[in-house]
Amino acid sequence: MQAIKAREDVLDRLRVACDKLDSSLGGASPLALAPTDPLVRLFYRLVGQLRSRTLDVVETLAAWHRRSQTAEHFVYYGSPYMLNIGPDLVSGRKGE
């Protein structure tokens, strides 16, 4: 559960950063941002953290499956967590 909460925290911070960027640009995307731009550096850091936390979740749930010897999905807030890992990145908002 700790691994999932850590991943969800990073995902929430990434969503907030995306919302701030979107509102500051008025909904339009810039043509290019410099790699040294603080916002770009923040995104690189958050995406790296999300990747690491996602791997932690996968490894933790794999270990749980081995220990429990079950084929059941790990359910988090009413839905199988592993099935939501991809869609939660696309939807942009929890529950969409």
Image (spheres, grey):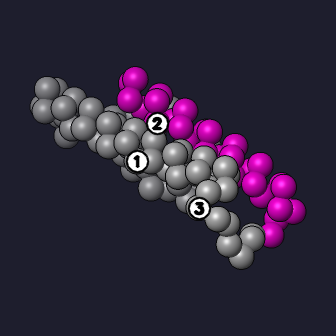
| Residue that mark 3 sits on | 35
Residue 77 lies, in percent from the top left, at: 50, 32
| Residue at horizontal 67 percent and vertical 56 percent from the top | 37
* Amino acid at dot 1: Arg
Q: Are marks 1 and 2 in contact (CB under 8 Å)?
A: no
Categorize mark 2 by other alpha carbons within 10 Å: few (<14), some (14-19), many (20+).
many
Q: Residue furthest top?
A: 2
User: Please, what is the three-letter code of the amino acid marked with disc 2?
Assistant: Arg
Image location (x, y in percent) of residue 45? 52, 46
Q: Which residues are magenta?
A: 1-28
Q: How many numbered callouts?
A: 3
Q: Amino acid at mark 3?
A: Pro
Distance from disc 3 to disc 2, alpha carbons, whole Å, reads: 25 Å
Task: Say left or right for 29 vs 4.
Answer: right
Query: In this view, which residue lies farthest toward the front?
Result: 36
Residue sitting at x 75%, y 54%: 21
Of the numbered discs 3 and 2, the one sitting upstream in the chain is 2
Looking at the image, is mark 1 or mark 2 nearer the viewer?
Answer: 1
Residue 29 seen in the figure: yes
Upstream in sequence: badge 1 or badge 2: 2
What residue does disc 2 label?
7
Residue depicted at x 37% and y 42%:
52
